[in-house]
Amino acid sequence: MIKPTKHTLKKLESLFDDMEYEIRYERGNFQSGYCIVQDKKVAVVNKYYDTPGRIDCLIDILLSLEIDENNFEDPKLAHFYKQILKNSQSEEEE
């Protein structure tokens, strides 16, 4: 299980940065708490969410994207991404 800490949030933000995605925390009426701007690598997350809410949104976005884990420059980020995938698969099985 991934712990909802500020450190985890920073690692997720680094993961998106490595994929050349911009994350913005802004106000808006997002039904799911976030939106992805089409044809641009921008993810907008509700700025009023606390750390666990932001982490959940970023993980949801991450799981909706098609990502080749071999493209990560940092092996630690690739390992973190694999942990997220493994964690989401185990939650789906339950």
Image (cartoon, helix red, strand yellow):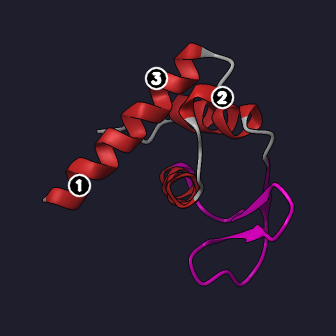
Q: Position of residue 39 (x, y in %)?
A: 85, 66
Residue to which mark 3 is pinned: 79
Residue lying farthest right? 40
In-image side of 94 versus 76 (left or right) = left
Q: Which sits earlier in the primary sequence, circle 3 or circle 2?
A: 2
Task: State which mark lies toward you, 3 or 2.
Answer: 2
* CB within 8 Å, label 1 to label 3: no
Q: Mark 2: which amino acid? A: Asn
Q: Residues within 10 Å of mark 3 (few under 14, many from 20)?
A: few
SS for tag 2? Answer: helix
Quadrant occupied by the N terminus: top left
Extent of the magenta region: 22-51
| 3D distance between C-alphas at marks 3 and 2 | 12 Å
Label 1 with label 2: CB-CB less than 8 Å: no
Mark 1 or mark 2, which has the lower sequence index?
2
Q: Within 10 Å of the Cα at label 1, are there few (<14), some (14-19), or many (20+) other Cα atoms?
A: few
Residue pictured at 76% horizontal, 78% vertical: 28
Amino acid type, residue under disc 3 in the picture: His
Whether residue 6 sits left or right of residue 34 in the image: it is left
Q: Mark 2 points at which residue?
A: 71
- Which mark is on residue 91? 1
Q: What x and y, as percent, mark residue 34? A: 65, 69
Tell me if 91 is positioned left or right of 10 in this view: left
In the rendered image, which quarter contains the C terminus?
A: bottom left
SS label for mark 3 = helix
Residue 68, percent across and down?
58, 38
The residue at the far left in this view is 94
Question: In the displayed image of the protein, which residue is found farthest to the top?
Answer: 75
